[in-house]
Image (cartoon, grey):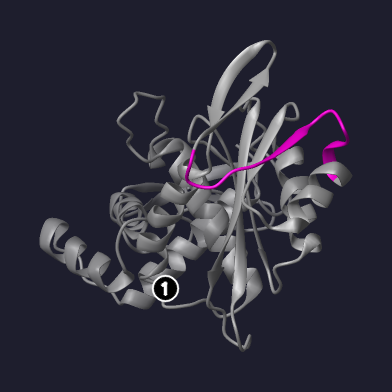
């Protein structure tokens, strides 16, 4: 056991706070506990309450979260408290490295979102593979080639290898963005709702952009509870948190390995 301030090993036990062991350094007199370096440091509520709040917050609004916690575990707190816990969790996820293996076919699309201070709409760019995994998200003020390039560069950074095909709608910015980020080896295909055939590695595959349009409907259900974001930075933070939840925590029809919130915290 080392002191969190002076790194001294001259540390002794100093009673309990609730169920947590407290320690005191005999050199600098600094006090600490078992939760000093954890996510739950300086929180007076039990860990299980905070975990349930964050999990419920991925589905419903913070006011509904407060109601569910009150009815299930009989703890009461303000909806702003639930919001702050979720925001702290979002910052924790943003610092985690998430390089993963995705399939060789990606889909990209953009949807408008409301951000305070922007007169019209901002745009949320979403990149996903054909196995329903979100690769990257990006928020920009305009629907232009710069936003398309940034979203694809984020996806390239997060993935272990580049895709063979990228499927998009008819936005002209995608053609130039795919060529700029991935070069000529990556094939850009324009598709809408109707599936059309294409040859890849001597195999005929049928591609459409319905997969990403279906994802946009799920994003809408989650996005409604915010009623808009306060800034582009906040929008990016919340969207990245939901991407992590969608990939690794959300239950699916097709079985996959689910990481619980206990493993993250």
Judged from the image, the secondary structure of the residue bearing numbered disc 1 is loop
List the single residue furthest toward the top.
202
Residue 147 place in picture, x, y as percent:
75, 61
Q: Is residue 190 visible?
A: yes
Q: Residue at x 42, y 33 (%)?
A: 259
Q: Nearer the viewer, residue 63 or 121?
A: 121
Q: Residue at x 78, y 48 (%)?
A: 175
| Quadrant in which the N terminus is drawn | top right
In the image, is residue 81 above or below residue 1? Answer: below
When asked about the image quadrant of residue 68, the answer is bottom left
Residue 218 place in picture, x, y as percent:
38, 53
- Residue under label 1, please give it: 226
Residue 55 place in picture, x, y as percent:
34, 51
Q: Nearer the viewer, residue 181 or 45?
A: 181
Circle 1 packing at 10 Å, graded few (<14), some (14-19), many (20+), is: some
Q: Residue at x 29, y 63 (%)?
A: 60
Residue 189 shown in magenta: yes
Q: Which residues are magenta?
A: 181-194
Q: Is residue 31 visible?
A: no
Q: Residue at x 88, y 46 (%)?
A: 180
Residue 4 shown in magenta: no
When asked about the image quadrant of residue 188, the answer is top right
Q: Nearer the viewer, residue 124 or 93?
A: 124
């Amino acid at each position: 056991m080392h002191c969190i301030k002076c790194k001294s090993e001259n540390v002794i036990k100093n009673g309990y706070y609730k169920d947590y062991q407290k320690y005191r350094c005999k050199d600098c007199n600094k006090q600490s506990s078992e939760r000093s370096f954890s996510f739950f440091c300086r929180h007076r509520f039990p860990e299980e309450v905070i975990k349930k709040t964050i999990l419920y917050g991925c589905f419903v609004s913070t006011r509904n979260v407060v109601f569910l916690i009150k009815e299930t575990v009989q703890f009461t707190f303000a909806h702003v408290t639930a919001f702050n816990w979720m925001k702290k969790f979002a910052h924790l996820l943003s610092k985690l490295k998430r390089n993963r293996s995705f399939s060789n076919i990606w889909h990209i699309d953009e949807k408008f979102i409301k951000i305070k201070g922007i007169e019209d709409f901002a745009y949320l760019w979403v990149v996903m593979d054909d196995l329903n995994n979100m690769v990257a998200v990006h928020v920009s003020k305009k629907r232009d080639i710069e936003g398309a390039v940034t979203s694809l560069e984020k996806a390239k950074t997060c993935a272990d290898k580049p895709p063979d095909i990228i499927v998009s709608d008819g936005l002209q910015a995608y053609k130039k963005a795919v060529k700029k980020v991935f070069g000529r080896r990556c094939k850009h295909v324009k598709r809408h709702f109707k599936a059309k055939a294409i040859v890849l590695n001597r195999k005929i595959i049928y591609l459409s952009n319905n997969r990403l349009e279906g994802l946009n409907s799920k994003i809408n259900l989650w996005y409604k509870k915010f009623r808009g974001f306060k800034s582009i930075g906040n929008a990016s933070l919340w969207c990245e948190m939901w991407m992590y939840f969608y990939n690794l925590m959300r239950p699916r029809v097709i079985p996959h390995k689910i990481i619980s919130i206990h493993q993250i915290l």
